Amino acid sequence: MGSAVLLLGFATSLAGPYLPLFAAEKAHMSPFVVGVFMSLLAVSSILVSLQLGRVSDRLPSRKPVVLLAAAAAVSGYLLLTATTNAWVLCLIAVVFLGTGAAAFPQLFAFARSRLGGVPADVAEQGLTTLRSVFSLAWVVGPGVGALVVSGLGFRGLFAVTALLYLLAAVVVFRSGSGQPTPERAKVATASGPGAPPASAPPLALIVTSFVLYGTSLAMGSISLPLYVTRELGGTTTDVGLLVGLCALLEIPVMLSFVFLPRRFSNQTLIVFAFGVFVAYFALIWLAHGLGLLLVAQLIRAIVIAIAASLGMAYFHDLLPGRVGVATTLFVNTTAAGSMLAGLVSGAFAQLFGYRSVFLLCAALTACAWVLLLAASRRAVRRSAGGPAEAAADQT
């Protein structure tokens, strides 16, 4: 399963950072239209992923859902090689790329289902290891993508991306079914699938906080390539260096969650990550050259490592017994953020320039931190107050 995750990571890291550049340079979209394009992709991925998540929780094996999503991605990226028409590109994003985006949550849900009846902490470590493999692909993927664009153009980039999705699908096809064991089914039934523990934080606050975090993360990701190349005078190679460095720094942080004992809960670490993410965007806003951008990648790496690896386990705890829905809900908070980010970042960049986008990102991240902190404190009160307090909080 690790090889499938690695291939999927290479596929997303090759094409992902350069989709906004392709839309702007080859399809001649304005900053606002680039935002619309990315938002349509996000909306489609949310709607399709939610439906596929529900379907996968009902099927004896998640493999067909993973293969369907991978096949859609292969088709979508091959179609990107054949047109630069803005309207056609939007249609491809909605129909094919949006469906292909479901490959990530469903592959991780499939991997979780293959862990059998192992303890929850061991399963969490396994998923964290796989997430570090995904990040490993992002270490070299953006740099390789920059080389492919310079040598073969965007058509070559999308063709290679389609091939990687195809290879990932082949690996999944040849793997086991990932069918739940009877022991796991009993545990899920006993714990009440989908029912959060009495002391769990309010789900609405958690989801809203992660959506705001996802919005700022996506706005930064969309704007950074154009900010570097258009306002700071950098190159696509510089963009690849920044993205690759961040992914490289993520790996030791993620692996520390596997091999080192932890003194803090998932929730505490995520609250910390959201707080320091504000500093990252402040540094980007202050930057006037590549140096400060490179330094800022350390903060970004720590934040993404915590939110990406522990966030998934956090949502699994909130929705016990519903791995597919919980994984998809977690991933879709980022997708919902991307939907908002495309429109907002495009409009802001067109009106005020790309630098202003990062100041807005800092404000949104600060709001996400406040909401998550409030949710965690409410969870503490519910735990201290017992069932009566929990019932009062839900009414």
Image (spheres, helix red, strand yellow):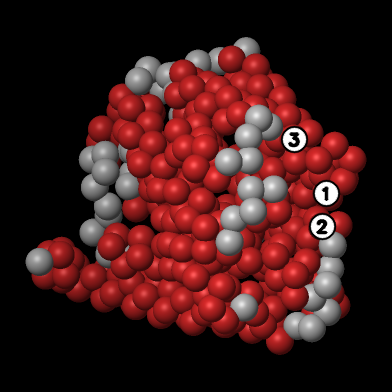
Tag shown at residue 236: 2
Look at the image and tell me whether residue 291 can be seen: yes
Q: Position of residue 101 (x, y in %)?
A: 52, 39
> Distance of mark 1 from mark 3, alpha carbons?
13 Å
Tag shown at residue 253: none
Of the pair 385 and 125, the residue shown nearer to us: 125
Of the pair 323 and 210, the residue shown nearer to us: 210
Residue at 54 percent across and 78 percent down: it is 351
Instruction: Tell me: residue 291, above or below residue 339.
Output: below
Q: Position of residue 279 (x, y in %)?
A: 63, 82
Question: Based on the displayed image, in which of its 4 quarters is residue 278 positioned?
Answer: bottom right
**Which one is closest to the eye, mark 3 or mark 2?**
3
- The three-letter code of the residue at mark 3 reads Arg
Instruction: Tell me: residue 107, above or below residue 13.
Output: above
Residue at 58 percent across and 25 percent down: it is 75
Residue receiving disc 1: 146
Instruction: Tell me: residue 375, above or below residue 321.
Output: below
**Which one is closest to the eye, mark 1 or mark 3?**
3
**Upstream in the sequence, badge 2 or badge 1?**
1
Element at badge 3?
helix
> Quick one: label 2, few (<14), some, or many (20+) residues within 10 Å?
many
Q: Position of residue 173 (x, y in %)?
A: 59, 15
Residue receiving disc 3: 155
> Quick one: label 1, few (<14), some, or many (20+) residues within 10 Å?
many
Q: Which of the image's four quarters has the N terminus?
A: top right
Instruction: Tell me: residue 371, above or below residue 32.
Output: below
Whether label 2 touches label 1, CB < 8 Å:
yes
Residue at 52 percent across and 58 percent down: it is 33
Look at the image and tell me whether residue 358 can be seen: no
Residue at 71 percent across and 70 percent down: it is 227
* Left/right of residue 111 with respect to residue 43 in the rendered view: right
